[in-house]
Image (cartoon, coloured by chain):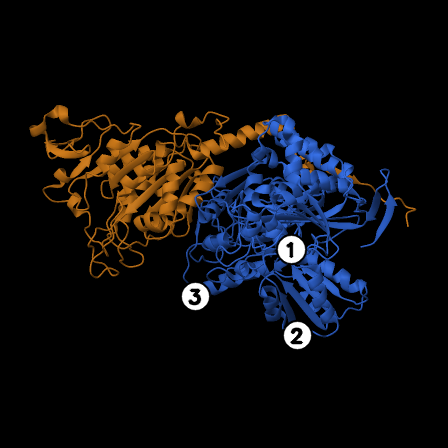
Chain colours: A blue, B orange
Amino acid sequence: MSTDTDVGPAGREVRQTHRVVIRFAGDSGDGMQLTGDRFTSEAAAFGNDLATLPNFPAEIRAPAGTLPGVSSFQLHFADYDILTPGDRPDVLVAMNPAALKANIRDLPHGGMLIVNTDEFTKRNLAKVGYESNPLEDDSLEPYTTHKVAMATLTRGALEPTGMSKKDAERAKNMFALGLLSWMYHRGTDATEQFLREKFAKKPDLAEANILAFRAGWNYGETTESFAVTFEVAPARLAEGTYRQITGNLALAYGVVAAGLQAKLPVFLGTYPITPASDVLHELSKHKGMGVTTFQAEDEIAGIGAALGASFGGALGVTSTSGPGVALKSETIGLAVALELPLLILDVQRGGPSTGLPTKTEQADLLQAMYGRNGEAPVPIIAPQSPADCFDAALDAVRMALTYRTPVFLLSDGSIANGSEPWRVPDVDSLPDLSTTFATEPNAPDGSGEFWPYLRDPDTLARPWAIPGTAGLEHRIGGLEKADGRGTISYDPDNHDRMVRLRQAKIDGIPVPDLTVHDPDGDAEVLVIGWGSSYGPIGAACRRVRAAGMSVAQAHLRHLNPMPRNLGDVLRSYRRVVVPEMNLGQLSMLLRAKFLVDAHSYTKVAGLPFQAEELAGVLTDAVKGDLPA
Amino acid sequence: MTATDLPLSSPSGSLGGLDLVPTTDDTQKAKDFTSDQEVRWCPGCGDYAVLASVRGFLPELGLKRENIVFVSGIGCSSRFPYYLDTYGMHSIHGRAPTIATGLAVTRPDLSVWVVTGDGDALSIGGNHLIHALRRNMNITILLFNNRIYGLTKGQYSPTSEVGKVTKSTPMGSVDAPFNPVSLALGAEATFVGRALDSDRKGLTEVLRQAAAHRGASLVEIFQDCPIFNDGSFDVLRKGDDVAERLIKLVDGEPILFGNDGEYGVVRSAAGGLEVAKVADVGEDAIVVHRAGEEDPTQSFALSRLSDQDLTHTVTGIFRKVDRPTYDDGARAQVEAATEQAEQRGDNLEALLRGKDTWAVMPEPENEQ
C-alpha cells in the first residue's frame, strides 16, 4: 500500500492512501452491522470503490460478551477498482474483549486497533478466557493501539438528554462511527440525515444517536491521541451513475425488472430462510410494480404456489437456501416434467443440514445439477458478485421463459449480504423478455386439437397455453407424456425419446463463450471458478502477475449448460486450478465432462477465500509445485 | 409490528365463489366436459359415480369451460383431471392445494378445484390442506375418502379404522384416524360438507353450494374402493337401518332422521350433541341446524356424532360462513399499491437508482 504524506490544517499529518480495510467488531447487540453499513454508504457517496463482508452469528442475540456472540462488518474501500472485501483489516475496531479476542489474529502487525476500554472488566475478560487484561499487558504491543472509553464518552455526551445511562451507552456504536468518519475525512451530514430518517418516529433516539456520532467525530478532532488522518480519493470507475447494492437487493430488483421486461406479473412463493429472506422482504415492498409475494406454510408450498402461478401465466419465482432446495426438489422435478417457466433463487449457505445459516459456501452446485429423481436437467446460472445478481436474474428469467423450464440461480451468503458499487443500468437498455402464450390449436394432423408437448423445432420448448384460452383445454402432470400430444404414455420408446428431448432442450440453450483473461498472453496455468469466488480469484491473479508471473483467469457464469468452448479452453493450458468453497464439485464436473486433469483447491470455512492464500496456490501452480 | 387495515375492504362478503369467472350462454352438457381419455379406474370404483356427478353438475354453473381448472395430487382419485375436458394438472403427492393457491391468487377469473384423497390430503399433504383452509383460498376441495391406499395396493390410510388389517398392518392398525370434517372445522374452514359417492342428489347439492361459496370449500366424499376396502360404506347404502344411520342436514331445520323422523339430535349433558328419540325428548329439544353460525361448536359436535363404525353419519353442509379470502385480500393489496405507484409516478428507473447515487464523470482526456 503506497501512501503520500501531507500536513493538514490542524497541524496533523494527512496521509493519502489508495485502499483501506476496516473491520468493526462487537457484540451482536452492539449494532456493528448498522455501523458498517453506514460507513459503507459514506464511502460509496464519496465515490470510492468498495466491497463489504458482514459476518454475524446465526443466533439473534447470543449471550452478551461471549465469543459466539461476536458480530463483525468488514469494509474495503479504495481509489481504484477492487475485487474483494480484503483479506485482513488495516484498522480493527473492537467494542469488547470478545470482539478483540475473535479478531485480533487477523490484524497484521503494525495495524491500527481502536478499543472500547469500558467493556474490559474482570468479568468480561473472564468470560472469554483472558487471564490478564490485554490492554494492560504487552500483548497488543505489535499494534498501534488507541484505547478509547467509548461508553463513558457517549454517556457524557448524552447527559443533557436525561437518558438513562444504559440507554445512552447503546449509542456507542455511533460514537465509533463518528470517530472513524473523522479519521477518513468523511462528511457528517448524510449520516445525521440517515439517523433522523431511521428514527423518524422516535426523535429522542435520533438526537441521541446524532449526539453520539458528533461526540465521536469531535473526539478525534480535539484529542491529541490521533496524530494521523487518512484520505482515500474517489475511484476511477467507468462513467455512469452508481449506487451501493447488496446481492439480495440486486436479486430482488432483477426479479422486478424481469417481470416488467417480460410484461408478466411476478409471483414469489417462498418461505423465510437465512440468508435468502431479504429477497422476500424486498419484493414484498414492490406490489405496486406487478409483484405478488406469498409467504407459504413451508418450502414445498412456496414453490408449489409459484409453479401454480406459472401454470396460470405469471412469472413464478421461489427463493430459498440449500435446505429449502432439498424440500423443493420434487416440485422442481414436476416443473421439469411440466416444462413451465420457474425461477429458483438459491442463496447458498454452509451445509449439510442446518449447517452454518449465516455463513457462505458454494456446495449446492451438485444439488442444483442433479438433486432430483430421474433425468431432470435444469439450467444453472451463478452471479459472480453482489451487483451481478441483477443481470443474472434477468438472464435466468429469459432462459426460463424462452425454454419453458425451471432455472436455478445460485447466489451465496457472501454475495447476498456483501455490497459493492453498482452502475445503475439504463432502463431502456434492458433486454426485452416478452414471451407469447399459445392461442390456437396446433395439432399437425389438422384435427383442430391442441398438443401441449408439440415442440418449437429451434428451442425444443413447448407452447405455454394458459387457462382461460378457449379451445386449448389440456391436462398436464408428472406422469410421462406422449411426445407431441402430451397424453399419458407408458410406451418404452416414447419415454426414452422424452428423456432425451428434455435433456437436449437444456443442452441446446445457447450461452456465451467463456472468455479468458490472460493479460500477458503466455500463461500456462488457468484458474477457473464460479460464483462469489470471482473477487478473491481475480485479486489473487493480480498479485501473481504483480510478482512477475503469468496466470489466466476464467469464470463460469453458466454452469448448465456450460459454454461450448469450455473444453477447448481447458485443454489449451498446461495446468488448470479450480478453487471452490466446497470439496471440488465443479472440478468433478469438469474432469468428468472434459477429461482434463483439473486441480481442485477447496476451502469450506464459511468465509470467502482470501486473495493471499489463492495467490499462494496459483504461485505454486505456476512454479509447477502443485501437490498431486 | 402493528396490524394495518387492509387498503380496500375485501369483496369476499358480497361476492360469490364464481362471480369473477366468465360465463357462457352456450348450452353445455355433461359430454362437453368429457375428455378423450379412457377412464382407467377399477370396475365398481366409487370414483366413477363422483365423476358422473361432477360432469353432470358442471354445465349448471354456466362457466366458460376454459376458465375451469382441476388440480390433483397423487392417488386413484387424483387421475380425475385427465377425464374432464377443462384445464387440469395432475401434480405431486399432497401438493395440489399449493398449486391451486398460486393459481387462485394470480387468476381471479378461474374456477379452481382440487381433487384429492384421504392419503393425499390428510397424510402427505396434511399441512397444505389446513393452511389452504385457514387462509380461506377461493378454491373447492373434493376429498375422496375411501379409508385406504388404493394406488399403492392396499395399505391403511389416515382415515382407516383402528384395528384395520391391511398389507402393511397384518396385526391390525394401531393408528388413530382423522375425522376429515372435524379437522377442517378445526382448521378454520369456512365451508365444510360431506356426501356419499352414490348419492348423486345429495352430492350435487353440496357441490353446488361449495362452488358458490367464496373461500375454501372442503367436501368430503365417502367413496368405495371395491378392490382394497370393498363395501366400507355399505351400511350407509343398503339394509333396513340406513335411515337410522344417515343424517341429512338441512339448514334452518331441526335435525331429524329415521324412516319417519323419529330420531333427532339433542344437546348432551356433556355439552356436545347426541341422538335421542323424539318421542322421549319432545320436538322442542331437537337442535336446529345453522350452517351459517360463526361459532363452529355445533357443527363440530355434529361431525363427532359418527364414530368409525358409521353408527350415525351426518351428511350435507356442516358450515358455510363468510370470511375474507386470502386471494381477494392479496389482490386488493396489489391493486392499492399499484394505484399508489401510478399516482406517485413510480417507475423502474427510480427504483433502481434509489436514494443515494453518485456520478462518475468521464476521465479528462489529458490525464496520464
At 52% from the left edge and 39% from the top edge, which residue is drawn? A293
SS at badge 3: helix
Residue type for callout 1: Ser
In front: A22, or A557? A22
Quadrant housing residue A185: top right
Residue type for callout 3: Pro
At 48% from the left edge and 27% from the top edge, which residue is drawn? B6
Question: In terms of sequence position, does the residue under pointer 2 or pointer 3 come before the other?
Answer: 3
Measured as percent of width and height from the top left, residue A82 is found at 75, 52
Cα separation between marks 2 and 1: 25 Å
Cα separation between marks 3 and 1: 43 Å
The residue identified by callout 2 is A627
The residue identified by callout 1 is A532
Residue type for callout 2: Pro
Is disc 2 in the same subunit as disc 3?
yes
The residue identified by callout 3 is A492
At 32% from the left edge and 39% from the top edge, which residue is drawn? B218
